[in-house]
Image (cartoon, rainbow, N blue to C red):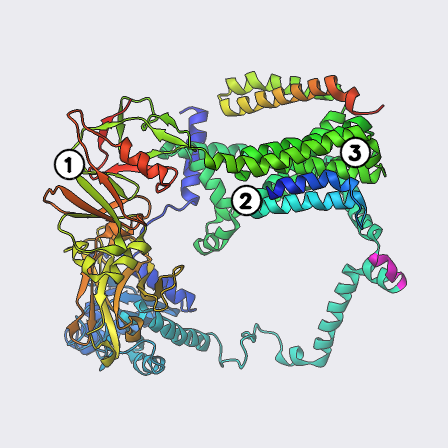
Amino acid sequence: MTKLLKIKILSVALILLVTQPVKAQTSTEYYKSLFQLWGTPVDILIQDELQKSDAPATKRDLQKVLDQISGNTINNQDASKVEKKVIETLSEERYLLLLSSQKNLEVPPYRKIIIICNTVDLTDSSFPIPCTSNTIGNTNFAEINPLESSSSDRILKTIKPTVIGNITYYAIPQVLLITPEYQKGLGNYFKALSKAGASKYIPDTEDEEAESGLNERFRDSSLYESTLYILAILLFVIMSRGVLVTMVTRPKRLIERSFYFNILDHALTFLNKNSGTLLFNFTVLALFYIPIIYALHTKSRVIGDPSYTARYLLTTLNPSNVPSFLIERNIFRIGLMLYNFILIMFGFFLITPNIIAFFTESADKLMEVKIKTNFIKWLIPSIISINMFLLALTELRSLSGFISLSAAILLASLLYIRSRHINYASMFNKKELGIVTTGMILLLALNILYPLYKNSQPTKYTYEPLIGVKDTVVAFPYSKKWGKNVLFETHLYRGNSKVFADGFLVYAPNTQKIINKPLKDFAGEKSITLTSSNPNDTIEALLKKPELLSFVENNTFSPLFALNNTSNNVFNYNNIRAEITFNCNLTSTPSVVKLEILSLNEFESKSDPLNAGSTEILNFPGCSIRNGSETFEVPFNNYTIPQELVVLRLRGIEARVLLGIKLWAGTAELPIRFLNKEILNEDAYSLLYSSKDFSPEITSYSTKVEKEFTIEVKTTEDGFDISRPINDLVKQGRLQNPFIIWTTTQSELIEGN
Amino acid sequence: MVLSVFFSIVFLVFFLPVLISHTTSSIAAVLIIVSLVIFSTGTTGVLNFALALLCLHAFVIGFLTDRKYIYTLAIIFLMFCPFLLVAKLGKIAEFSAVLCYLSLVLGILKDTSYDKIIEN
């Protein structure tokens, strides 16, 4: 193997070892991180590291443990012998976290075990703490409003340790971990537990920490405390000696500019003196970048992602990612980030004196320069005249850069005049002044009259092809950018799909007339199409016109659904329960699932027509199984959903991971209607509904249409000229720039130029 | 229209009776123009103005610098191009070529206009 190949393999191995690939987190891993956040050190059994058949006698599986506890299978004598051996090898401090769905696992010896009940298996078992995913003992947490003040009390009363054979068990129904409010309550419980375990007593204040072995009496003594204060003062005086002396002896210096410039000067002098050392250090540090870039480049080639190197470096340098690096304990990234910051710091120290020197020298140079009076005399009126002329003919937006430059030149010229005490007015004789003033007055008149003249003239349009690219075949959707006073040449469409320009239907086969109307004016005609581009506008229209719901309804699950809460007596119950089903075949990471509730703003505000409320309903822990689906049931406050027609949306998780949702109030399932998920598509226009039958007149509703627009469709043998209705829309200013031409067929190919 | 009025005020204020000094009034008019542009264009206006000041500063310093430095810079940027092209860094080579061109333009402008603008 060549040396180069060895180096390559080593570098890749190093990068792969220290950079952790993204992987799906199972629910046990999520629960583990949760408990660790609460100060409870837990271990979990990873499904892949399963038992061997010849495991030593001290290892036993959960079922056997439970059987042994119930006294069913193992006789007491044997049990006590094994038990003693188990206890001798137990770890005092750590907990073992198990799911009730984890069966037939070899359970290593632990003194404390947390069992998360995510199945119904333990209800009728001999396990002394019968619990299911929602219940423990007689308490069903799914039927309690999590916002009730007594829910924390219930957690305290029901989650109690049970000691069996010197092993302490905590049984927790899964609902307490996945419901956001319950999770907080449970967290408080375990935080208190971990504090109790950490010290003999619980301190009165947060700041007190456990004793580290120092003599308590010494730490409480007045001598120790006084020493701390004196040390603090000494340190402060040493650090700020110079400033303190100045404040006392020459306080007026503090308001002088020179005082601060001196400080800056000292720093710059130091940097200048040591610029050689800084340059050497910077160069050496920069050289280390070569193997780093090489390794990253090699990895990017291995994984086939050319942008990997840049992305990796940018992610590493982003300070907001530091917490995640620390949590993941990604040493390499933290090290690389620190290295980069040190490099940048050295670079900054190296470059700063030079930059400051450049600007001070250039400022001195500018102060010394003498510009010819004739030049400065005519510079100002010339720049002013050019700008006034251009402002008469063009818009401000397209001139903003030029005006900024002109303003900068004028400002510099005026500052020069002021610094040299030049009498600018005396530079002009009467004739010159007359010419310049007349010119400016004429330009002002041009600014007033030209726009009036332009508005009175019929607009002269120029024509350009509708499809601007030179390809012979072009795919729709097509984005067309257009200039001012531009119309489009004839472009014949020969396809069989409906053609849209933005939200306007411009062509439909076998149709003679198309009427485009705003979606909020829906009147329920026979032959219609419904399009959407803005989710909020569409939802607003659905809420105002509930008859639209039947046109956008879906039989299958969608993260967007409607609920008519006017007749449901939801408030008679303590809470609403949500049953959410997840697809475990896909890689899923723990997420907080939120329920967004959209209803009409009762004050009918134009700027804010919708009330949008969001509530966290489920802390999804990840799937506990690899395949199939898993359903989680969580309660949430019944007052979350207002008593009216609302549109609900599940957020916080990818829609493809969700398989279903049901809402329950008591034993009654609330009737939700799933809506077409294309409504949520913000990036492109979507066709929500199109009548199947052909009709000579078709009405198209869209949120992009503000006023009714009618098109007479006249098709020839060669096809339909779609430029004609588009030109009408352009003249009326109804289309955006750029606008999208799209059809009901995905990626339809048409003839180009 | 409003901007045009303020532009004309920048010049005409020198010839009108004002309470404060003419130059200060003129500077105030320029600042009002800048404010109006920023108001119309937002952040873009602020950035445009800052960039314009920086470019103007750099151009004037370059203009006042000895021509030997300007032409030396042009040669250096030109020499970078073939090496960058060989290293398949086409975009950086193009950037270097543009820098060479700008240095030459600055040098030529200096040679042709320096004596007309700056007093020795």
Q: Residue furthest right?
A: A249
Label 2 sits on a secondary structure element that is helix
Looking at the picture, tell me which residue is in the foreground, A25 or A714: A714
Q: Are marks 3 and 2 in contact (CB under 8 Å)?
A: no
Q: In this view, does A603 lie above or below A328?
A: below
Please tell me the numbered disc located at residue A509: 1
Which chain is home to disc 3? A
Q: Tell us which disc is closer to us: 3 or 2.
A: 2
Judging by the rendered image, the residue that carries numbered circle 2 is B41
What amino acid type is highlighted by mark number 1?
Pro
Please tell me the numbered disc located at residue A366: 3
Q: Distance between the residues labelled 3 and 2?
A: 31 Å
Q: Do the residues labelled 3 and 1 touch (CB within 8 Å)?
A: no
Q: Tell us which disc is closer to us: 3 or 1.
A: 1
Asked if residue A562 lies left or right of residue A430, the reply is left
For label 2, the crowd category at 10 Å Cα-Cα, with few meaning under 14, some 14 to 19 and many 20 or more, is some
Say if the magenta span includes residue B18.
no
Residue A39 percent location from the top left of the image: 43, 69
Residue A578 percent location from the top left of the image: 23, 68
Which chain is home to disc 1? A
Provide the major secondary structure of the magenta segment: helix
Residue at screen point 64% across, 33% down: A442
Q: Tell us which disc is closer to us: 2 or 1.
A: 1
